[in-house]
Amino acid sequence: MPHDDFPAGSVWLVGAGPGDPDLLTRKALRLIGAADIVFYDALVGRGILDLIPTTTERVSVGKRSGRHSRDQATIDALIVAAAATGRRVVRLKGGDPAVFGRTAEEVAACHATGIPVRICPGITAASAAVAAAGTSLTLRGVARRLTLVTAHAQAGAPLDLDWQALADPDATLGIYMGRTAAATVMQQLLAAGRDPDTPVLVVVNASLPDERIIRGRLSSLAFLVETVGASDPAILIVGAAVGSAAIATPVRLLQVARP
Ligand code: SAH
């Protein structure tokens, strides 16, 4: 049965997931296939872009920390203008549009101009990162709270986070855009009393062929990110849950030759 959820002149904000095309939802794939135009972020990788039909117009609105090629107001205006000419618009975003995805602004811009807009969720980086490491974000009786924070501050501004709350030993912290601020995150969490032995996980390019999993302790977080390239997406996860014995053994460990 044909779907009638994507009329001409409407917008879908679509989560592209962490990068592996297999982690795209079937709905996202269908919407990408039905779009007349796709606006995509820098984090949306080649494997996903290859799924856009070649006849569909595609526009990079690539935003990356420190290199904002188009500001948010411009992106809002582009999306609205495309839909206003009667086109079906997909706005493709890395991960889940609802997690540090500027979704509220784009939805508001559509509402303000009477453009119908809907959201298709995606797998967020924190989920992909712990899956890659064969562990979990929560742990029964140990990590009962999950806090997602962004450690990206305005240029020159200090990181304005409630460190005391983040130091709660029951909580797992998923820190997005945290590579540059890793040393500050480490110092502030330690100063607020978080145990220096708290397990940490840094996952670079989660779900992509060049994925890298770095494990350590909070006291070495600043050092752990030293080999992470500035243009590679990396997420930091802090908390007892990620130190738990691997719940599922990552495939690469199974491949290690045994004596
Ligand atoms: N909406 C996205 C997050 C956008 S903010 C989501 O739900 O995942 C961009 C940040 O997300 C990056 O700086 C990085 O911290 C994280 N990120 C996105 N994709 C990632 C990936 N494949 N591997 C590791 N971190 C990723």
Image (tube, helix red, strand yellow):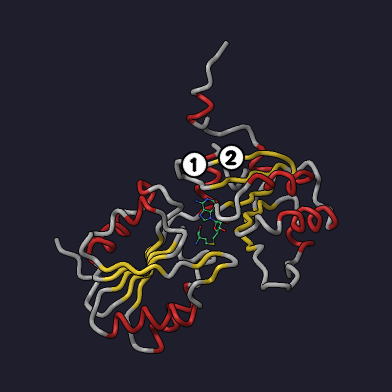
Left or right: where does residue 185 sit relative to residue 235?
right
Which x, y percent locates residue 231?
Answer: 55, 55
Question: Residue 83 sits in which quadrant?
Answer: bottom left
Tag 1 secondary structure: loop
> Which circle marks residue 210 in the picture?
1
On the image, which quarter does residue 57 sit in? bottom left
User: Which residue: 81% across, 46% down?
Assistant: 195
The residue that appears at 66% across and 51% down in the rendered structure is 172
Local crowd size for mark 1, using a 10 Å CA cut-off: few (<14), some (14–19), many (≥20):
few
Q: Is residue 162 visible?
A: yes
Relative height, residue 84 to residue 244 (above, below): below
Q: Position of residue 130 (x, y in %)?
A: 55, 44
Q: 56 and 197: which one is in front? A: 56
Residue 223: % across, % down: 74, 45
* Of the pair 220 and 23, the residue shown nearer to us: 220
Q: Residue at x 44, y 65 (%)?
A: 41
Q: Is residue 99 left or right of residue 226?
A: left
- Quadrant into which the N terminus falls: bottom left
Which residue is under mark 2? 213
Q: In the rendered image, which quarter is residue 258 located in?
A: top right
Q: Nearer the viewer, mark 2 or mark 1?
A: 1
- Give the left or right position of residue 167, taking residue 16 as reference: right
